[in-house]
Image: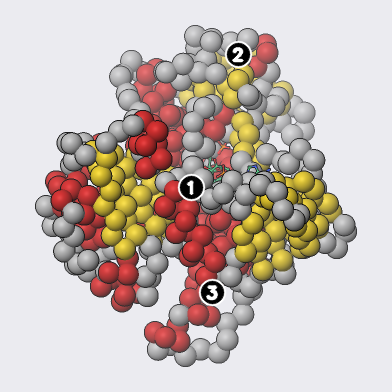
Amino acid sequence: MQYNVIVIGSGPGGYVAAIRCAQLGMKTAIIEKYNTLGGTCLNVGCIPSKALLDSSEHFHNAAHTFKEHGIDISEPIANIKQMITRKAGVVKANVDGIAFLMKKNKIDVHTGVGSFVDKNTIEVTAADGKKTSLTTDNVIIATGSKPTPLPFAPFDKKRIISSTEALELQEIPKHLIIVGGGVIGMELGSVYARIGSKVSVVEYLDSLVPTMDGTMGKELLKATKKLGMDFYLGHKVTAVENKGKEVVLKAEPKTGGAAIELKGDYCLVSVGRRPYTEGLGLEKVGIELDKGKVVVDDHLKTKVDNIFAIGDVIRGAMLAHKAEEEGVYVAERLAGQKPHINYLLIPGVVYTWPEVASVGYTEEQLKEQGRAYKVGNFPYKALGRARASMDLDGLVKILADKNTDEILGAHIIGARAADMIAAGVVAMEYRASAEDISRMSHAHPTYMEAFKEACLAASANRPIHL
Ligand code: FAD
Ligand code: NAD
């Protein structure tokens, strides 16, 4: 079988690249080693975690806010088995949707492990050992990533688990210990804290979600403490042991002091993910790795002329929409177009409640650059909309250039921040000033009014409702 493009890996990077290649008239195939398409994101990542976040949020509201809203119900019971079953249905609908899109775009799907024979030949090995040889003009590597274990405590998938197992638990943990207060730790920690688990998060650095603007980590700490989550920031984990019916974690404060020992029924290790290239046979074509990542140039091309790589397997943020942009980029380059990706404006979102969402520079980055900037903050508690919905935690923080007023960063923690951040992306893509946004009408009452008010605060220090 001869193709113009073969994509290896069917996550959001790979399947989007394949669709865009097919739209542009290339004969395209996609290779996926699992029986379902969609990669980490659809099967064991973005989609199932959001399904459980939504279910647990409904439960939390039924247990804690319905009464005040005037809805009297008997005490709700969290049925984890049903939550996991519903989640599986959501995943199935999504992965079936990708299979439909492959058919619609006449993309051949080959199930099995894809491996380079040479730069134009890929061998696919199916689960039963059957091998198929495919030839192609171009290859896009989109093989994604896997969870990183602690060096001294590999995943046993029973007590020491990754996000994949944490999305499949058949019981509500009595005590869930989490190593890593990043995105996965905070999202899955919220799920279990809401449905009754005691949750303890041990984080090496001094703040949660440390790659985001510092204000976001501080506010998220306050909000999730209200959920009853416990935090051990600035702690170095020294041991995690499966003791059969329980797991025991030991950690020491980085700055000295008494060590801690936590006993729980599960320990979720969420200390980042690592690029996945096993079985690809990269050595056969001379492709280089840097700390496990496939090395690419500014056009996402590897050292080999006709081989490209995208998504989690290369440098940059490990995000589904970043992988998608890169998939489109490579397809359009192959078609002779001149696409562009503005990496600064790829937003990041944490789907806790309140949600956290950021785009552009953080205050810490602006300080490091020595750039003169202004800050405008506006709290949710001053919003009529937030009072109506009882979502008073959070704020919008706008960073703008001190001299030109151009928006340099937008950071939101609060209800629906995940959707609101798109306004920050649009504003920054069009290089809007904070004053530009503050002079545009925003519907009342909406959470977006906090965005407008934060822009007023940043541009001229004159918010109306504060
Ligand atoms: P992947 O999605 O990892 O897909 C790679 C695919 O390649 C896999 O299906 C794999 O089986 C296949 N493969 C690998 N090697 C071979 C081979 N040799 N032959 C054939 N197939 C192969 N990101 C967000 O933007 N938003 C979120 O809300 C979000 N939530 C997440 C929640 C969790 C719990 C996790 C773990 C991740 C989450 N992410 C989220 C990150 C997101 O899932 C990844 O950034 C995204 O999936 C990367 O896409 P990708 O296409 O590069 O790779
Ligand atoms: P992460 O990088 O978000 O967080 C890892 C955290 O673990 C960091 O805070 C880090 O300081 C801490 N850490 C590292 N080593 C440690 C140690 N030995 N002891 C204690 N703490 C330690 O990684 P993650 O949460 O595992 O997520 C993996 C990837 O998946 C991320 O790149 C993320 O972008 C992506 N993801 C995205 C979303 C989303 O977009 N909503 C959701 C989940 C995952």
Q: Residue at x 52, y 37 (%)?
A: 318
Q: Amino acid at mark 3?
A: Phe
Residue 287's label in the rendered image is 2
Q: Amino acid at mark 1?
A: Gly
For mark 3, does the 10 Å Cα neighbourhood hold few (<14), some (14 to 19), or many (20 or more) residues?
A: some
Q: Is residue 335 left or right of residue 147?
A: left
- The one nearer the camera, 321 or 20, is 321
> What residue is shown with label 1?
97
Marks 3 and 2, how far apart in space? Answer: 49 Å
Disc number lying in front (3 or 1): 3
Q: Position of residue 45 (x, y in %)?
A: 57, 48
Q: Earlier in the sequence, mark 3 or mark 2?
A: 3
Q: Residue at x 64, y 56 (%)?
A: 232
Q: Position of residue 266 (x, y in %)?
A: 75, 59
Q: Amino acid at mark 2?
A: Ile
- Cβ of mark 2 under 8 Å from ligand 1: the answer is no
Q: Residue at x 49, y 64 (%)?
A: 222
Q: Residue at x 36, y 54 (%)?
A: 412
Q: Is residue 129 above or below residue 193?
A: above
Q: Is residue 13 above or below residue 62?
A: above
Marks 3 and 1, how far apart in space? Answer: 28 Å
> What residue is shown with label 3?
59
